[in-house]
Image (tube, helix red, strand yellow):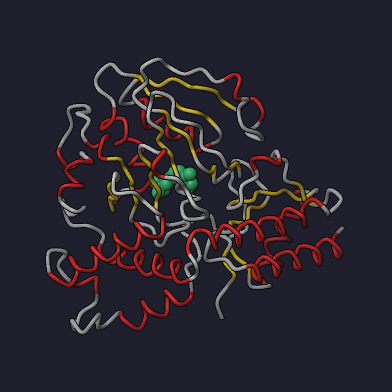
Amino acid sequence: MRSLNFSAGPAQLPLPVLEQLRDELLDWRGTGASVAELSHRGKPFMALAEEIEADARRLLAVPDSHAILFLSGGATTQQALIPMNLCAAGETADYLVTGHWSKVAIKQASAVCAVHTVASAEDDGFLRLPEKSQWTHTKGAAYFHVTGNETIHGVELFNLPEATQAPLVVDLSSNIASRPTDFSKIGLAYAGAQKNLGPSGITLTIVSRELLAREGMQRPDIFKFASHAAQGSMLNTPPTLNWYILGLCIRWMLGEGGTAAFEARNLAKSSLLYATIDQSAGFYTNSVAADCRSRMNIPFVLHDAALDAVFLEESERAGMIGLKGHKALGGMRASLYNAIALKDIEALCAFMRDFQMRHG
Ligand code: PMP
């Protein structure tokens, strides 16, 4: 019996993916070996990597002007590599601060380059986006970094800002593939796979070839995006098993109708959960402004924090896991990534209404 898993990541994987993984674990494509046991330089894996790149390009509609890199180290490592690759010595990078993960991005970059905060919503408790009229940009900034979706605060940027003279860099860790994205307007996007794309241990970096040509700072070759691109993301031994599982997930998403289909589903799922919260007469609350309420991660608090432990215990008994909120906010958080179906949210909302009736 599988749980309904609302974890923020690593998160629930589609059941057909897990079943295929199980079926192929001992003998993948007649090789007599698991993908995890095969050389990344051998023909079978090289062919697989090519297929996965083509599928990822199709799913995400990535234009030929951009390379897709399959890297290890997670999103946080990208946050450190981005300034090394895109900034020349002495240059400044601009950051919009919309929640916890924007701040982590700044923390990583600050060790590498000068950072300018374009605007911050911290004084508003990250409940709304920073007022656009207050944004200040650096003239000649190396790039402009935004966080597409704040996984902890539940704040999503539905309209990416127009690139200023500086190319746009976007952390898509928790909303990549949740709806169509126009990558032609993005200089570089990155996402750890463990939320909406697949397992942990592999990260997608989608970068324009124009930015790949930047000199960047002096750094070891292994930290160069251009070197990874030139070697098909096999500059060193890649996380082959994770890459393969990511490929299964991407194929599953294509089979389900791609990002346009997921946009419709994610809108329906998130609307239902927000309605349940908003119609609870204050029993449950989410205070994020309506225009930036995330469709992927929905934090909410119970009117009485003393009920938190009871809620978690009862939800777990009902087969639902991963609902405990991040420690920074407390309360609960439901993550509604692509592998979560509308019926799963219907089950969660039914549980929440029943819980309210019994404890309200
Ligand atoms: N950015 C965002 C938006 C995230 O949600 C996370 C992980 N929760 C990270 C960055 C860091 O990702 P990783 O753990 O893969 O380094």
x and y percent of residue 241 in the render? 28, 67
In which quadrant will I find the N terminus? bottom right
Q: In the rendered image of this protein, does residue 246 appear above or below residue 137?
A: below
Question: In this orientation, which residue lies closer to the viewer: 159 or 285?
Answer: 159
Residue 358, quarter of picture: bottom right
Asked if residue 310 lies left or right of residue 334, the reply is right
**Could you say which quadrant of the image residue 61 lies in?**
bottom left
Residue pictured at 41% horizontal, 60% vertical = 59
Task: Name which residue lies at 25% across and 64% down.
Answer: 240
Residue drawn at x 72%, y 60% as measured from the top left: 311
**Residue 29 as seen in the image, left or right of residue 171:** left
In the picture shown, does residue 14 fall above or below 191? below
341 to 34, vertically: above or below: above
User: Residue lying furthest left in this view?
Assistant: 42
Q: Nearer the viewer, residue 255 or 358?
A: 255
Q: Position of residue 170 (x, y in %)?
A: 43, 39
Residue at horizontal 70 percent and vertical 65 percent from the top? 348
The quarter in which the C terminus is drawn is: bottom right
Query: x and y percent of residue 213 in the render?
Result: 20, 34
Q: In the shown orientation, is residue 55 left or right of residue 153? A: left
